[in-house]
């Protein structure tokens, strides 16, 4: 019996992260002139290394709030930083006036609503939320 | 009293738990950092090391910093960073206070009080959360002045597949310096410096060069007035002049490397402070190498640092005779007193409790030339908000 429980628990442990990694996509306003971005371009925008979209227009990256699963996934996979490293990275720039982190805009729905009304904004949301109000330019693998 | 204490703790907690980390509301930004720390040494008869002096544990190595910035017009931002340190009786000081103009996406001009970009970690020297140690290695991070009042140009760019930053500044400072227990005035004029970084993937290379006309009057130091009288009486006024650093050319060179692969971290830095003429002050040659491993929320690091100063030749030009032997010995002792020869090995850990808060421990073995080894134990809780 206890062995059975242990097996169930083990299966649960293996499946949990898969369930948590629902696909996250990077979205912009449907009217923007480009259809895709590279992982590097996305990462440069969100790490403050670049302030422009591939077409040269100004980009305002939006974060989901701290603690959101999509934010953790995005920062790990695109920015290559866990929550602590991400915080340390930005504290190096914030306290020197050399950069401001992407604004925390709320949950995925709040991010989507902002992007659907502003062609300069870019953010990441769960792929299940994508509709005609936003355009997908990058899919996290 | 207790109620008062309680109030203070509640205030501190409120600050700590200020949920919106690195918060920014509209065009007004507020952010802050804090370090609460202390430690003890195993031999308090030795000289204090990096602020740690007692055999009993003390919690005296704390600091609080807050930063406000506000957009004052298009592309114009005003920023003030105030810090208060335990070691200064929590006297509030402005480390940064400047107006910046974002000239283009890649370049910013700042005017006001800036942090002098001497070192790799200069910009966020007080923000312990941003680096592995409780404080960067004392052998290299020893300069008493970290600020300059002036103007700078900061640019970011790319060079092939490298990310680059460049900072050029011009300015000056005037400050009090405590030397051997005496407060003396120190100032730089025509201070000009350059710092550049080249980064790719997980490594960053940095180089900096600074020059200034430095003035520090050392004639009031203990025992020095008598020595100067003797020198002048014996006709060696040129040697006496070396105690008056008056618009002497000084230069500071830095080379640094930082590596962070996520799992492995490493950093190395070499600095040299050199004076054009012989003065009481030694030429400082300092360096450190750090290697570390990160696993989960833990970082373990080992650092070797070294101070290998070159004492100046204060007695240069005095003929060696039995009559001058004592004077020469006294001058050499004065010069040697300003030259640090020290090797330090330290082992430290950093535990990221949550995103924004880290607890650090550090053990250092301090080996001063010709003296008994000293062990220093330190801890700190460091946070950004």
Image: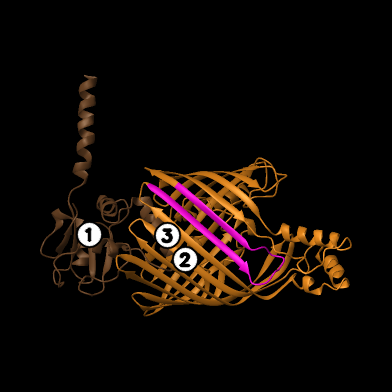
Chain colours: A brown, B orange
Q: Which residue does the image show at 15% across and 55% down from the upper left?
A: A127
C-alpha distance separating marks 2 and 1: 30 Å
Name the residue beneath numbered marker 1: A39
Mark 3 chain? A
Mark 1 chain? A
Q: Which residue does the image show at 70% across and 49% down from the upper left?
A: B47
Residue A91, disc: 3
B348 magenta-colored: no
Q: Is the magenta stretch mostly helix, strand or loop?
A: strand
Q: Which residue does the image show at 76% across and 60% down from the upper left?
A: B332
Seen from the viewer's position, the closer of residues A9 and B333 is B333
Residue B110, disc: none
Residue B174 locus on image (x, y percent): 64, 73
Name the residue beneath numbered marker 2: B207
In the shown orientation, is residue A75 left or right of residue B37?
left
Quadrant occupied by the N terminus of chain A = top left
For numbered disc 2, what is the local secondary structure?
A: strand
Magenta span: B264-291
Residue B58 locus on image (x, y percent): 63, 45
Which marked residue is nearer to the observer: mark 3 or mark 2?
A: 2
For numbered disc 3, what is the local secondary structure?
A: helix
- Tags 1 and 3 on a common chain: yes
Mark 2 chain? B
Which marked residue is nearer to the observer: mark 1 or mark 3?
A: 1
Q: Which residue does the image show at 26% across and 52% down from the upper left?
A: A77
């Amino acid at each position: 019996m206890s062995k059975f429980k242990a097996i169930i628990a083990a299966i649960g442990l293996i499946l949990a992260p898969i369930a948590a990694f629902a696909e996250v996509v990077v979205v912009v306003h449907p009217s923007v002139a480009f259809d895709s971005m590279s992982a590097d371009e996305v990462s440069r925008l969100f790490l403050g290394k670049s302030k422009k979209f591939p077409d040269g227009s100004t980009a305002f990256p939006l974060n989901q709030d701290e603690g959101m699963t999509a934010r953790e996934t995005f920062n790990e996979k695109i920015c290559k930083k866990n929550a602590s490293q991400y915080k340390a990275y930005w504290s190096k720039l914030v306290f020197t006036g050399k950069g401001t982190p992407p604004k925390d805009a709320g949950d995925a729905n709040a991010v989507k609503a902002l992007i659907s009304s502003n062609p300069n904004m870019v953010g990441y949301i769960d792929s299940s939320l994508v509709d005609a109000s936003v355009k997908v330019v990058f899919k996290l693998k | 009293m207790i109620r008062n204490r309680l109030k203070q703790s509640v205030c501190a907690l409120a600050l700590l738990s200020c949920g919106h980390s690195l918060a920014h509301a509209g065009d007004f930004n507020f952010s802050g950092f804090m370090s609460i720390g202390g430690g003890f040494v195993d031999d308090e008869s030795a000289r204090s090391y990096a602020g740690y002096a007692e055999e009993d544990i003390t919690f005296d190595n704390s600091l609080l910093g807050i930063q406000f910035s506000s957009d004052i017009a298009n592309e114009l931002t005003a920023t003030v960073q105030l810090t208060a340190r335990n070691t200064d009786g929590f006297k509030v000081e402005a480390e940064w206070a400047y107006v910046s103009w974002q000239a283009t996406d890649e370049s910013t001009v700042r005017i006001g009080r800036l942090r002098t970009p001497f070192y790799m970690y200069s910009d966020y020297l007080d923000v312990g959360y941003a680096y592995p140690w409780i404080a960067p290695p004392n052998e290299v991070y020893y300069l008493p002045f970290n600020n300059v009042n002036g103007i700078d140009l900061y640019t970011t760019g790319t060079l092939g597949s490298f990310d680059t930053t460049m900072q050029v500044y011009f300015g000056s400072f005037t400050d009090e310096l405590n030397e051997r227990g005496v407060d003396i005035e120190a100032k730089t004029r025509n201070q000009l410096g350059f710092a550049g970084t080249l980064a790719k993937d997980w490594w960053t290379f940095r180089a900096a060069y600074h020059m200034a006309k430095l003035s520090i009057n050392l004639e009031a130091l203990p025992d020095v007035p008598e020595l100067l009288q003797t020198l002048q009486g014996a006709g060696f006024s040129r040697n006496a002049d070396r105690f008056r650093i008056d618009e002497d050319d000084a230069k500071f060179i830095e080379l640094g490397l930082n590596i962070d692969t996520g799992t492995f971290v490493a950093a190395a830095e070499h600095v040299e402070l050199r004076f054009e003429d012989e003065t009481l002050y030694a030429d400082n040659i300092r360096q450190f190498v750090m290697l570390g491993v990160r696993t989960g929320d833990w970082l373990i690091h080992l650092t070797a640092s070294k101070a290998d100063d070159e004492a100046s030749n204060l007695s240069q030009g005095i003929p060696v005779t039995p009559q001058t032997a004592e004077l020469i010995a006294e001058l050499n002792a004065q010069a040697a007193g300003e030259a640090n020869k020290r090797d330090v090995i330290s082992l430290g850990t950093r535990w990221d409790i949550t995103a924004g808060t880290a607890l650090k421990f550090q053990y250092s073995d301090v080996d001063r030339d010709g003296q008994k080894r000293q062990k220093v134990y330190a801890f700190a809780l460091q946070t950004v908000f």
